[in-house]
């Protein structure tokens, strides 16, 4: 049966759902609040170059997600050699952490102390209390935790690591194995398959190319992607989603609704939500990001795709260098565009600061690293992203589960996406959510969409990539 389906949000999750449902012959309309598709994974035109909203490396260990990515991107991607390091005390440490690199750069004395605290942890591990701090300490030892994880994580989340849930660590941090390090050092180069640590596939027109193509397909195949149109909320009657209300006052009926709008805003606008569930939803918080792009009249700033900035004297958390991705996005321009990331809450001074003040701050911090000369920075551009990161505060799962349970009880409504489902998603998770939501709606499948991105075991770095540059089974 051909269904009339509304999708809220033209990011990876919403567009994937729209693309798949359109392929299956449904009548699809995607509503996007902003003037461009791609969500956080959009690519924007700036100073005659194409740049992403911070670093966007695609990877997935899911066969269907990889097949879909290749179906859309076709041959228009290149393999990018990956180099990502941590900037700390004016030194550059490899990330993911390499044991010998870290010990060597820390110096003999600190290296010995770190080894000591790592070994102590192996003999008598710190008792885990569900926090980020005890999770990381129990794997790396107190000293390595303080140097390589504490400052950065507290910059990112704006709360002490004792208050941060260990889920965030389990999802994003690769285990450190001294045995593996010794093995790699001894047998370097022998039978070494390329993994996600070494390379990744990147679309030649920027990450957003994937989503621009999906939107084009929808528009050319009977569906619609409507830009600059914000959805106010979803209407439901007797626990069945019936229609959408747009910000412009229009209400439109649909057979099915897929939401990727922030979960808290969706909940605020649903009718008859019990007080207890409302309170649970209101306890979920998000962290904002400010991206300050700088145009630097230098073409050899540093070799990394991006750098993690752990230095506590600097407010920024990460610097992306768009000269080190694929040359196509630089469009023959000699200047380097870098993006400096600042994380904050609504009430923080930086969120309220003017663009001019933020550009000044970014220029000063960039020059302080010694990576660019102040006189070579000749332009700046600010992009503010509200609700960029769902905050995994300690114990966040309890209220989230209440909200999940309530939303699951509403028929004809699928809730997916990064802020949509309050999951710290990469693109692949959001694509998978879109794919499976489409199967539920069109093929009568019963995938539990809330379960996506909850299995963290060795998610990211160790997988071997195949001939396409993606993980192949
Ligand atoms: C700095 C940074 C670096 C990242 N690096 C990587 C990386 O290396 N690799 C990776 O895979 N992922 C990365 N990500 C994550 C990736 O960007 C997201 O996982 C992905 O974009 C999430 O897709 P989504 O569709 O769930 O949500 P979003 O991308 O947030 O899209 C949601 C869309 O919904 C729209 N919307 C919201 N509310 C409404 C409304 N009421 N009405 C209509 N439209 C609405 C928004 O405007 C937006 O376009 C990074 C993210 C950031 C911020």
Image (spheres, helix red, strand yellow):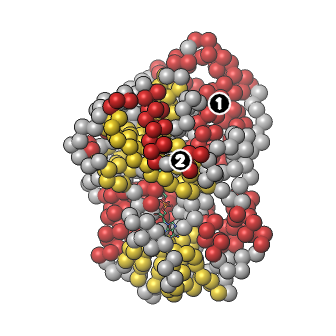
Mark sitting earlier along the chain (1/2): 1
Q: Nearer the viewer, residue 52 or 316?
A: 316
Q: Quadrant of residue 123?
A: top right
Q: Is residue 457 visible?
A: no
Residue drawn at x 73%, y 40% as measured from the top left: 162
Q: Residue furthest top?
A: 108
Residue drawn at x 36%, y 78% as measured from the top left: 223
- The mark found on residue 353 in the picture is 2
**Looking at the image, is 102 positioned above or below residue 150?**
above
Question: Mark 2: is the Cβ under 8 angstroms from ligand 1?
Answer: no
The image position of residue 140, as x and y in percent, is: 65, 30
Question: Mark 1: is the Cβ under 8 angstroms from ligand 1?
Answer: no
Label 1 and label 2: CA atoms lie apart by 32 Å
Q: Are marks 1 and 2 in contact (CB under 8 Å)?
A: no
Please identify the quadrant where the N terminus is shown. bottom left
Nearest-to-viewer mark from 1 and 2: 2
What residue sits right under mark 1 in the picture? 145
Q: Nearer the viewer, residue 266 or 407?
A: 266
Left or right of 443, for residue 119: right
For the residue carrying disc 1, how many other residues have a C-alpha within 10 Å: few (<14), some (14-19), or many (20+)?
many
For the residue carrying disc 2, how many other residues have a C-alpha within 10 Å: few (<14), some (14-19), or many (20+)?
few
- The mark found on residue 392 in the picture is none
Residue drawn at x 56%, y 18% as measured from the top left: 106
Which element carries disc 1, helix, strand or loop? helix
Left or right of 219, for residue 165: right
Q: Is residue 8 visible?
A: yes
Which element carries disc 2, helix, strand or loop? loop
Q: Nearer the viewer, residue 209 or 265?
A: 265
The image position of residue 233, as x and y in percent, is: 57, 76
The image position of residue 340, as x and y in percent, is: 45, 40
């Amino acid at each position: 049966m051909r269904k009339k389906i509304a999708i809220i949000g033209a990011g990876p999750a919403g567009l994937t759902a729209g693309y798949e449902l359109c392929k299956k012959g449904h009548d699809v309309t995607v509503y996007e609040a902003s003037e461009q598709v791609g969500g956080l994974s959009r690519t924007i035109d700036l100073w005659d170059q194409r740049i992403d909203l911070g670093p966007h490396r695609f990877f997935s260990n899911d066969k269907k997600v990889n097949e879909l990515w290749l179906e859309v991107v076709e041959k228009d991607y290149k393999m990018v050699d990956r180099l990502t390091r941590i900037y700390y005390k004016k030194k550059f440490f490899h990330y993911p952490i390499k044991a010998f690199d870290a010990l060597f750069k820390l110096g003999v004395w600190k290296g010995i102390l770190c080894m000591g605290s790592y070994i102590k942890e192996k003999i008598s591990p710190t008792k885990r209390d569900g926090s980020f701090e005890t999770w990381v300490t129990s794997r790396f030892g107190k000293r390595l935790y303080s140097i390589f994880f504490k400052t950065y994580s507290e910059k990112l989340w704006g709360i002490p690591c004792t208050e941060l849930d260990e889920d965030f660590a389990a999802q994003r941090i690769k285990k450190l194995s001294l045995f593996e390090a010794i093995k790699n050092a001894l047998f370097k180069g022998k039978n070494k398959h390329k993994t996600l640590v070494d390379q990744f596939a990147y679309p030649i027109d920027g990450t957003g190319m994937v989503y621009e193509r999906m939107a084009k397909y929808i528009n050319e195949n009977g569906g619609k992607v409507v830009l600059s149109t914000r959805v106010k909320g979803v209407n439901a009657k007797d626990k069945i989603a019936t229609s959408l209300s747009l910000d412009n006052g229009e209400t439109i009926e649909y057979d099915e609704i897929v939401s990727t709008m922030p979960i808290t805003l969706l909940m605020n606008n649903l009718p008859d939500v019990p007080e207890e569930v409302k309170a649970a939803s209101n306890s979920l918080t998000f962290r904002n990001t400010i991206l300050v792009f700088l145009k630097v009249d230098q073409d050899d700033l540093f070799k990394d795709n991006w750098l993690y900035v752990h230095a506590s004297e600097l407010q920024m958390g990460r610097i992306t260098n768009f000269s080190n991705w694929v040359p196509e996005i630089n469009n023959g321009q000699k200047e380097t565009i870098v993006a400096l990331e600042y994380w904050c809450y609504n009430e923080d001074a930086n969120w309220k600061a003017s663009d001019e003040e933020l550009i000044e701050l970014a220029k000063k911090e960039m020059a302080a690293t010694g990576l660019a000369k102040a006189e070579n920075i000749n332009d700046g551009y600010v992009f503010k992203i509200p609700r960029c990161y769902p905050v995994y505060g300690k114990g966040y799962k309890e209220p989230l589960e209440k909200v999940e349970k309530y939303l699951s009880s509403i028929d004809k409504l699928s809730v997916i996406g990064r802020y949509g489902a309050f999951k710290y998603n990469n693109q692949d998770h959001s694509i998978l959510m879109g794919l499976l939501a489409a199967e539920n709606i069109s093929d009568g499948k019963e995938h539990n969409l809330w379960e996506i991105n909850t299995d963290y075991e060795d998610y990211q770095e160790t997988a071997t990539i195949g001939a396409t540059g993606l993980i192949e089974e």
